[in-house]
Image (cartoon, helix red, strand yellow):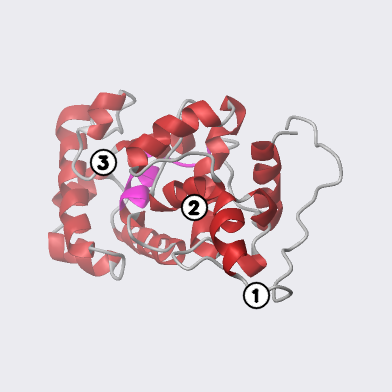
Amino acid sequence: MTNIGIIIRLLEKRYPGEFHGAQVSRHPFKVLIGTMLSHQTQDPRTIKAERRLFAVYRTPRELAAAPVPNIQELIRPVGIYRVKARRIKEASRILVERFSGRVPRDYDALISLPGVGRKTANIVFTYAFGKSDFISVDTHVHKVANRLGLVKTNLPDKTEQALYRAVPRRYWPEVNDLFVQHGQAICRAKPKCFMCPLVRYCAHYRNVVKPKRIPGSFTPPTSRLKGPRKGL
């Protein structure tokens, strides 16, 4: 089992019950709007905002006709909610006028929507359309991938391209989900290395954190696995 295979399995054990890119599970429009809401926002707030919004406005046509202040009130307190409300309304209008109310399956058409970049488009293609050809990279994936030493990049777009080369294709759908969970829970701006199951495989811990710690003050969590699992 390669290090990336071990890393993926350890993260699956650390975050059980989460969706790891294994199936098509949601409506494309909900995935699109949910991902737009998630920018600069923790998952619990994103989920609550998405539920409130879709309880009132269920379709692109309804959102396109909704007053911006109403959308703002429903999605608070997600980050930059005023900007997101305007983008959601405008994206919904374009979906209605240009795509018959459907999320386009053409990549270039999808990223032409307001507020939709590569990360959002990749998530839609992975989670809504069941495509395994994309790795979605946000600030968490960028941070975790660089700290682990999988890549050495300074921008998320460069991280995406580097991960395609560094990670076997079979793991691509899982990278975003697992690395985001880990980046939010443990591998934060000030990482909680004392509770991280990946320290034995982490370049940042090995090269930066470990040399600074006081001898005997910290024992890395046990992160060894008992034999390979089929498919890894």
Of residues 138 and 187, the one drawn nearer to the viewer in this rendering: 187
Helix, strand or loop at label 2? It is helix
Q: CA distance from mark 3 to mark 1?
A: 45 Å
Of residues 173 and 162, the one drawn nearer to the viewer in this rendering: 162
Residue type at mark 1 is Ile
| 44 to the left or right of 77 | right
Q: Nearer the viewer, mark 2 or mark 1?
A: 1
Q: Determine contact: label 3, label 2, CB under 8 Å.
A: no
Q: Position of residue 78 (x, y in %)?
A: 31, 65
Q: Which residues are magenta?
A: 24-36
Rendered view: 82 above or below 61: below
Q: Few, some or many C-alpha atoms within 10 Å of disc 1 (few <14, some 14-19, many ≥20)?
A: few
Residue at the image point whose x is 28% and y is 55% from the top: 57
Q: Position of residue 152 (x, y in %)?
A: 44, 40
Residue type at mark 2 is Val
* Among the two numbered marks 3 and 1 on one chain, the one whose residue lies closer to the N terminus: 3
Residue at the image point whose x is 54% and y is 59% from the top: 208
| 216 to the left or right of 125 | right
Instruction: Kindly identify which residue carries mark 1.
Output: 214
Instruction: Kindly identify which residue carries mark 2.
Output: 180
Quarter placement of the N terminus: top right
Rendered view: 48 above or below 54: below
8 within the magenta span:
no
Q: CA distance from mark 3 to mark 2?
A: 18 Å
Q: Which mark is residue 116?
A: 3
Taking the image as drawn, is residue 169 in sight?
yes
Q: Hey, which residue is sitting farthest top in the picture? A: 106
Residue type at mark 3 is Val
Q: Few, some or many C-alpha atoms within 10 Å of disc 2 (few <14, some 14-19, many ≥20)?
A: many
Rendered view: 80 above or below 131: below
Q: Position of residue 8 (x, y in %)?
A: 65, 43
Helix, strand or loop at label 1? It is loop
